[in-house]
Amino acid sequence: MEPGPHSDSVKMEVMKPVWSLASVLIAVTAYGQEVPASVKSAIAKADAAVAAIVKIPKAMRTFDNTLGALDLLSDDLDRTTSITIFLRNVSTDAKERAEAGAAEEFLGNYYVELGKREDLYKAVKEYADTKPNLKGEQKRMLEFTLRDYRRAGMDLPKNKRDRVAELEKDLNKIGLEFEENIAVDTLQLPLTNEELKGVPEDARTGWIKQNGNYLVPMTGPAYSAIVDFAQNPSTRQKARWIWLRRGGQKNVELLAQLLEKRNELTQLLGYKNTVDYEIETRMAKNSDVVAKFYADLKPILLKKALVDKAEFTQAKRDDLNDPKAELDPWDYSYYKRVLLEKKYAIDSEKVQEYFSVPNVLKGLFDVTGTLFSVTYTDITADAGKLGLPVWHKDVKLYEVKDKATGKLLGRCYMDLYPRPGKYTHAACWGLQVHRINDDGSERLPLVALVCNLNQPQGDKPALLSHDDVETLFHEFGHGLHGIFSQSRYARFAGTGVARDFVEAPSQMLENWVWDPAVLGTFAKHYKSGEPLPAGLLEGMKKARTLGSGIETQGQVYLGEMDQKFHLAKGGKIDTTEAAFEVYNADTVYKQLPGTLPEAAFGHLVGYEGAYYGYLWSLVYAQDMFTRFETKGLLNPEAGKWYRDHILAKGGTEDEMDILKAYLGREPKMDAFLKSLGLDK
């Protein structure tokens, strides 16, 4: 898709990584702030736990007192620091956000040093050298921990290990500075009322108005409103130009540093390139497999993209009464809306009237509650008693219980509306993960869904586009992956899977918002309560693959851009030139001159070399969905099978083995292609 609010940029997942000895937590600059005492205290406790592991005599080493203790140490540290650090993304207090940034940098550097401790490495090696006969999660834990140590450079001479640690700390600091520059970007677009012709008044709420003109903030909702509704093509072009300059030249320069330092790091560790290092631990394994994945997919996509372009171009020519008009990238969203209205009788503004936030949330809870046999209860008023913060009046906290047993499974925050200083896209954070203690007691998950949806206006509830509803289901898919986890160890809990599989459960849940029976349970007019008209829904279903070739080409572009950056020799590359080159080759458009598309691509931190995972996992998501198509989308039996065989397992087994066991066969690409309106 195009990088913007109608793409996975809005569905950006910055899932909190499960800690490992080689993990590198991305950290923002400390802004000169003192690290909170609670974080220092948590690290002091972690140090004491490390000391206890190290001093155990070699002959007395067991899994529980060495690797199990390491897992417990990391879970304790995450639980006592995660919310403090998470507040950087959501707090209304700039000082608190800065303190959270300082805490994240401090903790990230601590993890780097911890991963290089020779005495701890020796302790793990002592246990590994006993050749223990392990099974299941314990066997996987030992294998992964030894692999992590190798990837952390512990087999290197000390001088090289020291350089690895230095590079990891640099990457910590630079990486979140890159993300922070996107989050705090205050770019505004001055537009006259005439230039905004066609943009609904409701969408302009909160925009600065001076003498009848506007200063439009480049937030996701504002950008969407312009490219969807502004009748003036030059207005849409201006919006796209400024949207693709967020982060600015400073992020281009930071990205250059990131690429060079990542390359140096991976060369020290003995890898051919950054991509091979990053995806060694993922399903794809290496850059050659990713290259083949794209090479096989691109010719199939091109056929559909050319059909899409012809359809959209004709729509523009008819609209402008200009037989020579050509389609530009800033026209796509506008003419998709036009086609939806004219060809499929879908009025996007009218559609929103059937998706008020209260109804959508009730529907989300009812549908997933039925499917997975759980209940949801708003416990926001009790958050303080649980020691959990509520950082804004719009934030809600829910608890999730098993319907049959009444057992508490976990809790979920929801923070749905935009505000200054808040994370600008949509994401799900795993703040706490599932773990079973040695005494059999459970540590329960806590997740946080952060979105930037349209806000309520006076007595009028927040109304969502169908895309927004899809996004909400997507993010909730991540949340349920965490909440339904039944792993023994924190390392493998919930989303602790290979990163090119982590999107599959969330992408699969998007399918529910296209089903008539499902929508019939909650898509009701916010005033009258009337259900979504059957004709409107039928049009939406027919239009589901409208533009799918162009949009999926956009995802290929982002993935191949990421690959090109991280395969560059020496990590040296003109990123803007490369971004344009890939865009022009991978899509049916030409990139808009003067833009800096890489500067606002936040996935370059956290998904470096691995953005391909979005499309990769979508193949598996659609294949998994075929079981529900057969059994029924509201069938609790099918839901239980999925909950037990996919969500509960987390990363406790190899992802391909989990998939095969769930499907009862080898995975196939057929359902993915069908979902795009394609076939081989």
Image (cartoon, helix red, strand yellow):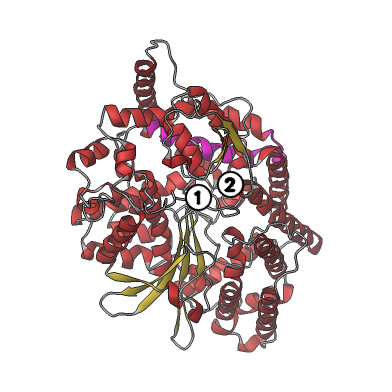
Where is 369 relative to 133, above or below?
A: above
Where is 340 relative to 110, above or below?
A: above
| Residue 165 pos. (x, y %) | 74, 61
Crowding around mark 2 (Cα neighbors within 10 Å: few <14, some 14 to 19, many 20+) is many
- Of residues 602 and 679, which is closer to you in this image? 602
Query: Is residue 235 found left or right of 229 in the rendered image?
Result: right
Q: Amino acid at mark 1?
A: Met
Query: Is residue 212 found left or right of 179 in the rendered image?
Result: left
Mark 2 sits on what residue? Answer: 602
The secondary element bearing badge 2 is classed as helix
Q: Residue furthest right?
A: 159
**Magenta span: helix, strand or loop, mainly?**
helix
Is any atom of residue 555 visible in this view? no
The range drawn in magenta is 549-574
Quarter of the picture holding the N terminus = top left
Q: Amino acid at mark 2?
A: Gly
Q: Quadrant of residue 104?
A: bottom right
- Of residues 333 and 131, which is closer to you in this image? 333
Query: Is residue 586 found left or right of 53 in the rendered image?
Result: left
Q: Are marks 2 and 1 in contact (CB under 8 Å)?
A: yes
The number of numbered discs placed on residues in the rendered structure image is 2
Mark 1 sits on what residue? Answer: 12
| Residue 479 pos. (x, y %) | 42, 62
- Whether residue 272 is in magenta: the answer is no
Where is 252 relative to 79, above or below?
A: above
